[in-house]
Image (tube, rainbow, N blue to C red):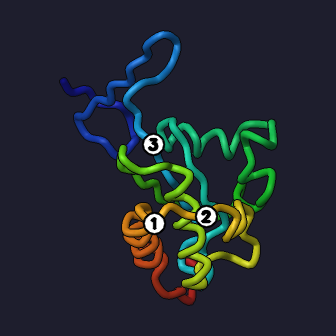
Amino acid sequence: MSAALGNWGMDNEAILLQVRDGELVGVGSWVYVWLRPSTDQPVIYVGSTGVPPVVRTWLHLHDDDPDVGRVVARYPDAAHEAMDVLAFSVPRHLSRSAVKAALIDLLDTRGLLSDRYAGDQPGLLTPDGGASPTAEWMADQVAAHSGPARPDGR
């Protein structure tokens, strides 16, 4: 099955979203990182969700409830600053909250959390040791995406 879905970076692809008993199913579990591109301490927020990351990102930007639109509520510059969001699928055998906690701790240890970081603080949860390799890989991806700062700030 294929269909053009507009300018979403998908050529001739369709996305099947299944709703069963009033709930989305099969969308997975995600941990995502909001970054200011090409800065030394890029991470302004780390979150987790059970809905497609594009939906959660939109809600963070546009929902007036500060508990739902919490990125803009806590970091208002996200509404107009260039931001990147990296989303990572969490393996089924791992706890989403454990992976998120381990990732936050690793990003803090590596000095990647912004001084304006607006998410859960490091050390709040005791990460599950089984989540460490996954969180380590995610932290590597964040570091690789961040790269060195460029003179033009982009």
Q: Which element carries disc 1, helix, strand or loop?
A: helix
Name the amino acid type tagged 1. Answer: Gly
Q: How far apart are marks 2 and 1 (CA)?
A: 9 Å
Rendered image quadrant of residue 123:
bottom right
Q: Residue 28 at what x, y percent from top left?
A: 41, 38
Q: Which element carries disc 2, helix, strand or loop?
A: loop
Task: State the residue position of label 3.
Answer: 29
Q: Which residue is drawn at 61% across and 64% down?
A: 126
Q: Given this view, does label 2 or label 3 mark the residue nearer the observer?
A: 2
Q: Which element carries disc 3, helix, strand or loop?
A: loop
Q: How far apart are marks 2 and 3 (CA)?
A: 19 Å
Name the amino acid type tagged 2. Answer: Thr
Name the amino acid type tagged 3. Answer: Ser
Q: Residue 116 at what x, y percent from top left?
A: 76, 72
Counting every numbered tag in the picture gives: 3
- Neighbourhood count class around disc 1 (C-alpha, 10 Å): few under 14, some 14–19, many 20 upward: few
Q: In this view, does 10 lie to the left or right of 67?
A: left
Q: Residue at x 43, y 16 (%)?
A: 19
Task: State the residue position of label 1.
Answer: 129
The reply to whether callout 2 and callout 1 are in contact (CB within 8 Å) is no
Rendered image quadrant of residue 108:
bottom right
Earlier sequence position, callout 3 versus callout 1 = 3
Residue extending furthest toward the left = 1
Task: State the residue position of label 2.
Answer: 126
Q: Residue 11 at what x, y percent from top left?
A: 25, 40
Q: Is residue 73 left or right of residue 58?
A: right
Figure check: 106 above or below 129? below
Earlier sequence position, callout 2 versus callout 3 = 3
- Neighbourhood count class around disc 2 (C-alpha, 10 Å): few under 14, some 14–19, many 20 upward: few
